[in-house]
Amino acid sequence: MVISEEIRAKIDAEIAKYPVKRGALLPALHLVQSEHGYISNELAKELGELFEIRPIEVMEVVSFYNMFYDSPQGRHHVYVCTNLPCSLRGGRDLLRQLESHLGLKPGQTSADGRITLNHEECLGACGYAPMMRVGAQYYENLDLEQAKKILSELE
Ligand code: FES
């Protein structure tokens, strides 16, 4: 894996915005992940060289934020909220039922590469619990049948 010239130019443009090179690491990670789908050790090494930091420091940032991935992911990221307000209205049960329906545990990706299932803490939509997020799209006041229908319509 190699960061393309196009992405490299965009990273350079981000770096120019910051007084300290390292300040542009988050936008650089977004750019590289948009190109490769996740941040591999090889990409962390490349970014480390670019930012003059160790690859482990790149991976520390990747592992800190849940929007970055260190392994291949499905085309759709499904996050079921299991924080207390959602759980009181069935969020944990919904996750268990979806695990069973999809044959996946949180963090796993379907064999066809379509869905990566996960749980997440509060997504800020507690008043509409239980809810899940698919990518950036929120689905609220869910029951199992609604959730299954949403997932079945993902390409
Ligand atoms: S607890 Fe689920 S959105 Fe807040």
Image (cartoon, rainbow, N blue to C red):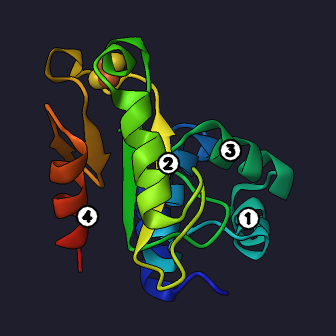
Residue type at tag 4: Leu
Which residue is identified by label 4? 151
Task: Report whether 34 appears left or right of 148.
Answer: right
Q: Secondary structure at mark 2?
A: strand
Q: Secondary structure at mark 3?
A: helix
How many angstroms separate mark 1 from mark 4 (CA)? 32 Å
The type of residue carrying mark 3 is Ser
- Residue 41 visible in the displayed image: yes
Q: Quadrant of the C terminus?
A: bottom left
The one of 142 and 114 positioned closer to us in this rendering: 142
Query: Within 10 Å of the Cα at label 4, are there few (<14), some (14-19), or many (20+) other Cα atoms?
Result: some
**What is the x, y in percent for residue 107?**
60, 54
Residue 118 is marked as 2
Q: Distance from label 3 to label 2 (Cα)?
A: 15 Å
Of pointers 2 and 1, the one earlier in the residue sequence: 1
Disc nearer the start of the sequence (4/3): 3
